[in-house]
Amino acid sequence: MTWQLFFTLLLTIIGWCVVHLLSVQRDKKKEWREFARETTHIVDEIEKEAIRYHTSDQRDEELEWNLKSYIDVLDTQIQLVKKHLNMKCDTSYLRASITLDNFQTCDFTKQKRDSHLIQGISWNALQIKENLFNAE
Amino acid sequence: MKTISIAKDFSVYPGGRTPEDGPHSGREFREQLLIPIFDGNERVVINFDGVRGYGSSFLEEAFGGLVRCGIAKEKIWGQLDFCSSKDSIISEVKRYINEA
């Protein structure tokens, strides 16, 4: 084998490895982007349940624990997405919009659909969904 | 460095803001476990992991409440460290201390 042939073979193998690695990387990113988009369903569910909680006639203690658990799951999934994709997202604002006021309190007050509190929940849910859809 | 685990030393099910709102409230946590830290000068790590979800009312009352109780923010930053597998919990607690 001449050195020219050896060099050509070596370059071909290196080129193949680079293409293969880039392809694996691209596939993994695609999977994480799909995961990020699926996570938006959890945000939808949290928003729906949070609005149901705050617009109820009475405080629902079981739903309080469920909401906190859902937010915890969302938090975990967003942490995972952030590890693999570029995304600026902080679930603390959504958690605060749901659980800072009128939550787990003996002074629970039924909220109107157009109240500041409900609008805040929808706004923060939308922000997270936008970030999840735009994660690259 | 001493560590306080909310799950082990207080409750896996932290509640709302005040004892009237239900058990394991933010005020109880602050009074039982946080305020005594500031009697000394030791640095303490607060570990948030292992809990079945936090409500912001608990976090605000426990940590923002420290400032309202008269503990200087510099003293809080000087003596408390926060540890959590979830960044959002720590950023939220820091926000409540800063905004209180």
Image (spheres, coloured by chain):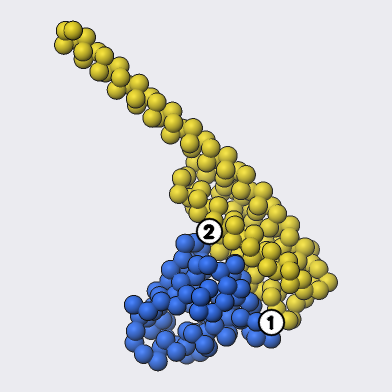
Vertical arrangement, residue B3 with respect to residue B86, above or below: below
| Number of other residues with Cα within 10 Å of mark 2, as a class: few under 14, some 14 to 19, many 20 or more | many
**Residue B34 % position (x, y):** 47, 84
Going 60% across and 43% down the picture, which residue do you hit? A37
Vertical arrangement, residue A27 with respect to residue A66, above or below: above
| Residue that numbered label 1 is attached to | B21
Work out whether residue B7 or residue A3 is closer to the camera in this orientation and state it.
B7
Display colour for chain A: yellow
Q: In which quarter of the image is residue B11?
A: bottom right
In the displayed orientation, state which residue is furthest to the front.
B8
**Residue A84 % position (x, y):** 46, 45
Work out whether residue B77 or residue A74 is closer to the camera in this orientation and state it.
A74
Going 58% across and 39% down the picture, which residue do you hit? A34
For badge 2, the amino acid type reads Asp
**Residue B20 % position (x, y):** 69, 86
Chain with blue colouring: B
In the displayed orientation, state which residue is furthest to the right.
A57
Going 43% across and 68% down the picture, which residue do you hit? B83
Answer whether residue A26 is visible to the viewer in this image: yes
Answer whether residue B98 is visible to the viewer in this image: no
Q: Quadrant of residue A20?
A: top left
Task: Using residue A55 as the reference point, say whether residue A12 is left or right of it.
Answer: left
In the displayed orientation, state which residue is furthest to the left.
A3
How far apart are the two marked residues, 1 and 2, measured between alpha carbons? 27 Å
Label placed on residue A90: 2
Q: What element carries label 1?
A: helix
Q: Nearer the viewer, mark 1 or mark 2?
A: 1
